[in-house]
């Protein structure tokens, strides 16, 4: 491609979300003239931007966002879950040439000889030729670099890449190096006596069992408490065991022959080392009436020490570009209902904020992955909307096709038989 001016080359304008700039300007107490003075624009241009009628360049987005004290992506009119590579660049106010310069300075950028011209072709979905561009492992390295430069997560960069270049194989993003246990974890484990080690590992195993139970409840659409609540495991009741019985954790320790009467000095020794946290609450026991219950929660440090003692690798829930087991299960349900789609009332809860187009994980938080969307189903004759159904987006279908085998190996408990018509 012949070298040309990067600003001329770039798909260089985006509209702002109507009303977004007005709201931010009002919060800051600025008039349009004041914003115009801060951004080197006219008051009329600011008005047109506020109405979503005047396309803005990355530099203008950056100046406007700085003037009204917000992030550029809070102003751009892009539905969450539909971001492209160009949108990620605009979200941080980078012109094409500036972004290309930053990418070219990275090891993968140098390997691929990234320039403004190649970045333009990348964002436009045009074929790219040359060493490495047809290798998913190599483009996976570029995805990671783009995420860092654009201040986006790896999964956001990968999803934007796949939306931009849907006809190509998905980049292969390297799994984080799990490595061995840290020196601090090894030292913490070495400081424990045998009894304390048994307590810590049994607490961790009970925590894992509880996590599995919560996963099963989600799968069966049963309400699940917040993790901050269910991770506080019942340890003991302050009362005679003949009246209160034993908790599941106490039964575990009894089977190991190390159970302490009452709360136990062993657990408090773990708490002093910062490996667990001990708290209390009051419950209405069915046999003993109102009793004090002792709760124990393993800390991150405690989990790392226990894994070091059991010679387990450093914990990584899943690769950065993959879904958790719970969300993969939800996506499989939607995929299995294709092409008709899953009735809207069959899918609810937090999953929508991670998977559904138009959602965000939290107010001001990252956008959902946009793997599913709510589609209107018209009545016979097209007279009115009869219902809404959840269906895979194009990206959702790409995601299932590209990563189904990986998910099958990682989450064998999820039944993927319904994917046969897609994969």
Image (cartoon, helix red, strand yellow):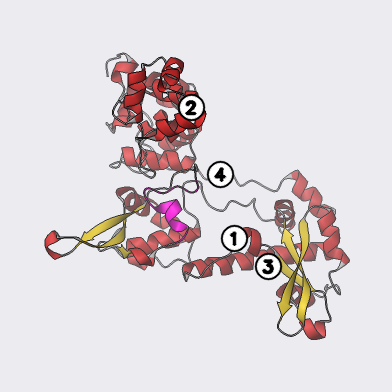
Give the residue pinned by disc 1: 226
Q: Nearer the viewer, residue 79 or 209?
A: 79
Q: Is residue 353 covered in magenta?
A: yes
Quadrant in the picture for the N terminus: top left
Mark nearer the viewer, 2 or 1: 2
> Mostly what secondary structure, the magenta segment?
loop
Q: Secondary structure at mark 3?
A: helix
Give the residue pinned by disc 2: 68
Which residue appears at 29% of the width and 30% of the height?
Answer: 124
Q: Is residue 398 covered in magenta?
A: no
Mark nearer the viewer, 2 or 3: 2
Q: CA distance from mark 3 to mark 4?
A: 27 Å
401 is higher (above) or lower (below) than 411:
above
Point out residue 90 in the picture as x, y percentages from the top left corner: 40, 29
Mark 2 or mark 4: name the one nearer the start of the chain: 2
Q: Which mark is residue 176?
A: 4
Q: Is residue 298 left or right of residue 40?
A: right
Q: CA distance from mark 2 to mark 1?
A: 35 Å
Mark 1 or mark 3: name the one nearer the start of the chain: 3
Which residue appears at 47% of the width and 69% of the height?
Answer: 221
51 is higher (above) or lower (below) than 361:
above
Mark 3 or mark 4: name the one nearer the start of the chain: 4
Q: CA distance from mark 2 to mark 4?
A: 37 Å
Q: Is residue 350 left or right of residue 208?
A: left
Q: Is residue 215 left or right of residue 130?
A: right
Q: Quadrant of residue 208?
A: bottom right
Mark nearer the viewer, 2 or 4: 2
Quadrant in the picture for the C terminus: bottom left
Give the residue pinned by disc 3: 206
């Amino acid at each position: 491609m012949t070298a040309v001016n990067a600003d001329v080359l770039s798909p260089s304008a985006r509209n702002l979300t109507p009303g977004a700039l007005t709201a931010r300007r009002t919060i800051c107490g600025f008039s349009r003239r004041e914003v115009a003075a801060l951004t080197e624009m006219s008051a009329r241009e600011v008005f047109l931007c506020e109405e979503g009628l005047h396309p803005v360049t990355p530099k203008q987005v950056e100046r406007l966002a700085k003037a009204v004290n917000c992030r550029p992506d809070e102003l751009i009119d892009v539905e969450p879950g539909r971001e492209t590579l160009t949108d990620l660049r605009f979200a941080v106010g980078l012109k094409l040439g500036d972004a290309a310069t930053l990418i070219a300075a990275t090891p993968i950028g140098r390997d691929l000889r990234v320039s403004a011209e190649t970045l333009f072709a990348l964002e436009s979905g045009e074929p790219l030729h040359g060493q490495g561009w047809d290798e998913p492992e190599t483009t996976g390295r570029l995805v990671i670099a783009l995420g860092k430069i654009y201040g986006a997560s790896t999964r956001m960069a990968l999803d934007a890449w796949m939306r931009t270049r849907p006809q190509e194989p998905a980049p292969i993003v390297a799994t984080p190096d799990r490595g061995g246990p840290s020196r601090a974890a090894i030292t913490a484990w070495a400081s424990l006596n045998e009894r304390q080690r048994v307590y810590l590992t049994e607490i961790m195993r009970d925590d894992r069992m509880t996590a599995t139970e919560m996963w099963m409840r989600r799968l069966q659409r049963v309400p699940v408490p917040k993790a901050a609540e269910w991770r506080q495991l019942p340890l003991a009741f302050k009362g005679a065991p003949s009246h209160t019985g034993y908790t599941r954790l106490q039964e575990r320790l009894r089977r190991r022959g190390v159970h302490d009467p009452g709360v136990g000095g062993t657990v408090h020794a773990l708490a002093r080392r910062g490996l667990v946290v001990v708290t209390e609450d009051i419950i209405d026991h069915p046999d003993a009436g109102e009793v004090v219950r002792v709760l124990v929660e393993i800390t991150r440090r405690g989990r790392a020490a226990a894994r070091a003692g059991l010679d387990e690798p450093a914990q990584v829930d899943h690769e950065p570009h993959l879904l958790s087991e719970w969300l993969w299960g939800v996506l499989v349900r939607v995929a299995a209902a294709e092409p008709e789609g899953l009735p809207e009332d069959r899918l609810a809860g937090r999953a929508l904020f991670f998977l559904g187009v138009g959602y965000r994980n939290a107010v001001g938080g990252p956008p959902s992955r946009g793997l599913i969307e709510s589609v209107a189903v018209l009545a016979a004759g097209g007279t009115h909307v009869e219902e809404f159904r959840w269906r895979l987006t194009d990206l959702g279908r790409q995601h299932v096709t590209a990563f189904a085998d990986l998910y099958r190996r990682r989450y064998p408990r999820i039944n993927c038989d319904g994917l046969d018509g897609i994969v």
